[in-house]
Image (cartoon, grey):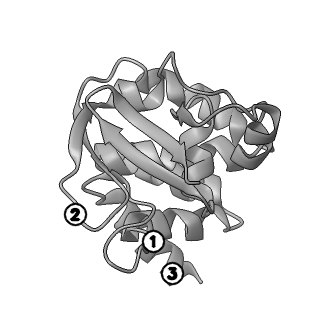
Amino acid sequence: MRKVVSERNETLGKAEAFGGLHVGYAGTPAPAVDALRTLIAEANAGAALTVVLDHGSIAGQLMALSGLYFVDPARFADRVEAYRTVTTPVRVLQDGCIQGGDPFPASTLVEDTRAIRLDSPRDTLTAWRQRNPGATALYVDIVGGGYPALLRAPHAGVVVIISERGTQTTFAR
């Protein structure tokens, strides 16, 4: 199992883009998303994700930060502050077959004033939607839990769209 964790850490740490929930013709997760999902299920997830935060690419770091949101909220709170002002461009993968990946400043992925706020790491996008039945679109960020929730597990009926205004998540009808 240790070898699997090491391989997943390497994949996540070398991520060239953030996200990638449903890419390509088959709509499968990008390798870094798959790696993150495997890592957050491990007993030593907090330590493994911290290695990526300390040594990974900026895209990998932001995805590892998203994982910490769930597995170690205290460490997440400590580490997120350092990313609130990072302006390094990060390529963000949009759902779909054609993958260019528009770059955005890392800080806009970390915190967006328009983004939803989940109540806690135990909250879900499905529960948020039930509390907000009129919502047809929403913005997500890492601090509010939207990106962490999307990256943690598949969400039926959720499509990520990138626009000049940032990342927007829509509910498919």
Q: Amino acid type of disc 3?
A: Val
In-front residue for pair 140/121: 140
**Nearest to the observer: residue 58 or residue 160:** 160
**How far from the left and from the top, in percent, is residue 153?**
62, 62
Report the residue that reaches farthest toward the front.
173
Is 123 drawn above or below residue 20 in the view shown?
Answer: above
Mark nearest the camera among 1 and 2 is: 2
Say above or below: 1 vs 126.
Answer: below
* Left/right of residue 51 with respect to residue 39 in the rendered view: left
What x and y, as percent, mark residue 14? 29, 60
Residue 16 on image: x %, y %:
24, 56
Residue 9 location, x and y as percent? 44, 65
Residue shown at the point (45%, 71%) measured from the top left: 8
Q: Quadrant of residue 40?
A: bottom right
- Amino acid type shown at disc 1: Arg
Read off the residue under disc 1: 8
Q: Secondary structure at mark 3?
A: helix
Disc nearest the viewer among 2 and 3: 2
Q: Amino acid at mark 2?
A: Ile
Is disc 1 surrounded by few (<14), some (14 to 19) or many (20+) residues within 10 Å?
many
Tell which of 144 and 128 is nearer to you: 128
Does label 2 or label 3 sit earlier along the sequence?
3
Q: Are marks 2 and 3 in contact (CB under 8 Å)?
A: no
- Decide if residue 109 is on the left or right side of residue 38: left
Circle 3 is placed at which residue position? Answer: 4
Disc 1 secondary structure class: helix
Dot 2: within a 10 Å radius of its alpha carbon, few (fewer than 14), some, or many (20 or more) residues? few
- Compared with residue 98, is residue 135 higher up or lower down, i.e. above or below? above
C-alpha span from label 1 to label 3: 6 Å
Instruction: Name the residue beneath numbered marker 2.
Output: 98
**Residue 148's mark?**
none
